[in-house]
Amino acid sequence: MSVTLAGRTRPPKPPHGAPVKPSLRERLARWDIKVSPYVYIAPFFVVFGITGLFPLLYTAYVSLFHWEVGDDHPKFLGLDNYRELFGDGQFWHAVGNTLSIFVLSSGPQIVIAVLLAAAFNTRLRSPVGWRVGVLMPYAASLVAIGIIFSNLFGPRYGLVNSVLEAVGLDRVEWQSNRIASHLAIAAMVNWRWTGYNALIVLAAMRALPTDVMEAAVVDGAGAIRRFVSVTLPMLRPTLIFVVITSTIGGLQIFTEPKLFDAMPGSNNGGSQHQFQTVTLYLYQSAFEGFDLGYASAIAWLLFVLIVIIAVLNYVLTRRLAK
């Protein structure tokens, strides 16, 4: 039986304990709560699928063929490109160069970035000026940086060799000697990226809770002790992020060695490939050897190498930061 109030008919209440059927608005509200988060993040995955995942999978597909530039009928090889690559001495030479430059750049880069962030976290005059100053190399053109450093480390008229001679030391063949060229390229990478990483670490330091620091001061811990035992362990997530991003960027290094020696015939990592990296060898295979299948196999092996080293760095950083 319905009840009439002021001319309106209201449906009878359901018996006690009977389920109440939600209205259409309530059902839509529930669906909105469940579906909205996925709708908000969907554009990222759509863009990533088009610009990231599809090229990655397509590169894996191309690596199974002998696919020359302009070839409409590539020849299927299966895993032959990978078998040839594992026996390619020049590829492993490029891997050694890449790892050498990576170690010489990423390690000092992170250490100096943390020390700079600690210095910026103190009371300095004109702190904004200091932060802008360390960020300027990151904002500069990478091509300009490569040209400047190739001239700084020039074999004849380079400023670095001039300074070495002024203090009584012999010139260094920065562009023909393998280890010296790695040091010069690592200096270029460190100069560009150290300030950027320092500001990331500084932002994490500014977000640390002050009560923990105050408790350490009350306990009598000095500045160095607080930094080592309190600050660094609390910066673990940020340090892991910096290490992983430095690993990915360091193993994909291309522009710095490409522009380091602009002499004719040495644009693939030196006249003797003394600083040829994996990405430079990939470039040479694709655009000079015109073998896209072999270059795609190089790209996939580089991808696997980056994943392995990034995971190792992640595990090692977590253990050291405990």
Image (cartoon, rainbow, N blue to C red):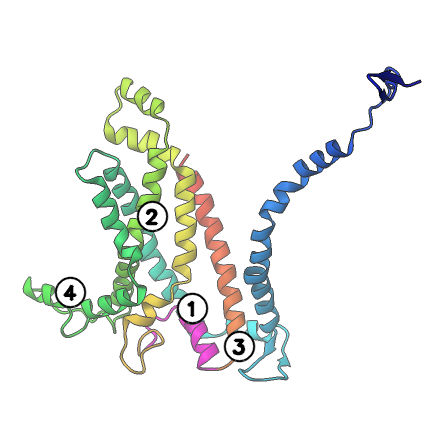
Nearer mark to the viewer, of 2 and 4: 2
Amino acid type assigned to the residue bearing label 3 in the image: Leu
Amino acid type assigned to the residue bearing label 1 in the image: Thr
Residue at x 82%, y 17% (from the top left corner): 6
Q: CA distance from mark 3 to mark 2?
A: 35 Å
Q: Is residue 226 visible?
A: yes
Precedes in sequence: disc 2 or disc 4: 4
Residue at x 56%, y 65% (from the top left corner): 55
Q: CA distance from mark 2 to mark 4?
A: 26 Å
Which residue is denoted by mark 2 in the rendering?
Answer: 197
Residue at x 14%, y 66% (from the top left corner): 159
Residue 279: give its label: 1
Nearer mark to the viewer, of 2 and 1: 2
Residue 65 appears in which quarter of the rendering? Answer: bottom right
Q: Is residue 108 magenta?
A: no
Precedes in sequence: disc 2 or disc 1: 2
Q: CA distance from mark 4 to mark 1?
A: 27 Å
Residue at x 32%, y 40% (from the top left corner): 202
Q: Is residue 86 visible?
A: no
Is 167 in front, or is 16? 16
Residue 160: give its label: 4
- Helix, strand or loop at label 3? It is helix
Badges 3 and 1: C-beta atoms under 8 Å apart? no
Residue 292: give its label: 3
Q: Position of residue 165 (x, y in %)?
A: 8, 67
**Label 2 CA crowd tier, 10 Å (few <14, some 14–19, many 20+):** many
